[in-house]
Amino acid sequence: MKYMDVATYIREKIDSGKYSYGKKMPTIAELSTNLKVSAMTIKKALDLLSAQGYIERRRGSGIFVKMNADSIKKRIPLTGNSSRFPEGKLETKVLKFGVNNPTKEIADKLQIKTTDFIYTIHRIRLLNNKPTIMEYVHMPIDVIPGINIDILEHSIYDYIRNDLKRKISSSDFEITGVRPNEEDKEVLGLDDNAFLMQIIQIVYFDDGTAFEYSVNKHLPEEFVYASVITDFL
Amino acid sequence: MKYMDVATYIREKIDSGKYSYGKKMPTIAELSTNLKVSAMTIKKALDLLSAQGYIERRRGSGIFVKMNADSIKKRIPLTGNSSRFPEGKLETKVLKFGVNNPTKEIADKLQIKTTDFIYTIHRIRLLNNKPTIMEYVHMPIDVIPGINIDILEHSIYDYIRNDLKRKISSSDFEITGVRPNEEDKEVLGLDDNAFLMQIIQIVYFDDGTAFEYSVNKHLPEEFVYASVITDFL
DNA sequence: TAGTGGTCTAGACCACCGG
DNA sequence: CGGTGGTCTAGACCACTAA
């Protein structure tokens, strides 16, 4: 996939300071001849980078590296908490692991029936030994077979990728602010005063199957969601 | 812009139920011949729609309308609170309107100097007569000239679009959860127990100028941020 | 293996910016 | 006006899915 390579190439130039913040970077024509790649392919790479907030395109003027391109480090994909934190800092404790039937709402979202079976998992994530994220996860047992405690204590996503060899393609999510319920309070050590940042997420495979409905509640001190909005529509 | 037209055409088919949820829609080849548009253009339209969560593309199988395509109504662009609520429901009260110098942080984000002048505006938004959103807005006076109370009591964005005739192209933002400060508490009628959903946002024109740094704090009862993540990288 | 979507190309043409 | 990015095209070829 050439346009991905081009995107990576350019991103590295930006990260390493070869193309500096706020300044103009090479034109499409230059990149095209230097990298021996068609202009359309360069443009496709630029589409990616501008959607991710690295660059800015000004018709008639050129392409500019965005000032705050380094703040992108906070713009982490929401798929999998394990990938969001430095290795070893994040521990996992499984509080509950069982099989049951979904509620109407969850069944709808997972595109299954209320008579089908799902795993229900409650996990707590500790960041630097402090309970930080409460996770309530539901997955259809038919879709994600062979889950066990061992997997849950590490990364479910690693299991899906490496063992089930399935490709995660997209996710719908919602961010809201909520008060903790009794379990949250107990596990995270909170009182009635506290509040949590809640992410409700549905995650899909590349064949369109929904395989996860999850509710993650984060301590606000540890939570930032950053993103970019660009133009169209 | 043909690909936009194609995207609109397809979105209308989805909204009107002509292409139904979870089902396969026409192939690229079909669309291409029916609409008399090249395949590449169709694909570009599909890029848009899939980034917005309307459809799902499965290589080798076809293109499918996403199950929850109607939940997209909650996925509102963050540029301008006025556009987020039905006409007439949202009132605006200006609490403070002055000119001063930016702090170091705001100056950096707006790409100006701490000796430059900015407008500082505090507004409160009432939804169905209830104080709901507290807005702290900063704009460089050189970039957004001619602001007055009358404009602030309606939509700043309308003024920018219709009178200044400038095009807004992108925005960086962050969502966090915070406790209210004294002003928030007084204006929104909150106690120490309360919390707010905070959006910090920098908004840019299409020539790359940053024209707004704003902090919006929403009552959690009224706040949902919904989005989609797709694949790449 | 036939059908479908994804990538890539070379080149035409348009829209916009700046001197 | 020349230089730049944006759109669109026709067509070649690849990757994947399902029968």
Image (cartoon, coloured by chain):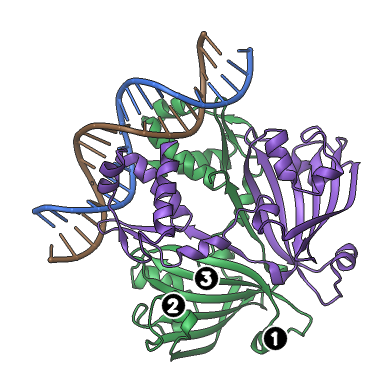
Chain colours: A purple, B green, C brown, D blue
* Secondary structure of residue under mark 1: helix
Towards the viewer: B196 or D13: D13
Towards the viewer: A9 or B56: A9
Towards the viewer: B3 or B114: B114
Task: Confirm whether circles 2 and 3 share one chain.
Answer: yes
Q: Which of marks 3 and 1 is in front?
A: 3
The percent coordinates of residue B167 (x first, y second) are: 37, 64
* Secondary structure of residue under mark 2: helix
Q: What residue type is labelled 1?
A: Lys
Q: Name the residue under label 2.
A: B108
Q: Which residue lies furthest to the front in this view?
A: A88
**Residue occupying the point 91% across, 44% down:** A98
Alpha-carbon distance for marks 3 and 1?
Answer: 22 Å
The percent coordinates of residue B32 (x first, y second) are: 41, 29
Dot 1 or dot 2, earlier in sequence: 2
Q: Which amino acid does label 2 sit on?
A: Asp
Q: Name the residue under label 3.
A: B201
The answer to which quarter of the image holds residue A207 is: top right
Residue at mark 1: chain = B
Residue at mark 2: chain = B
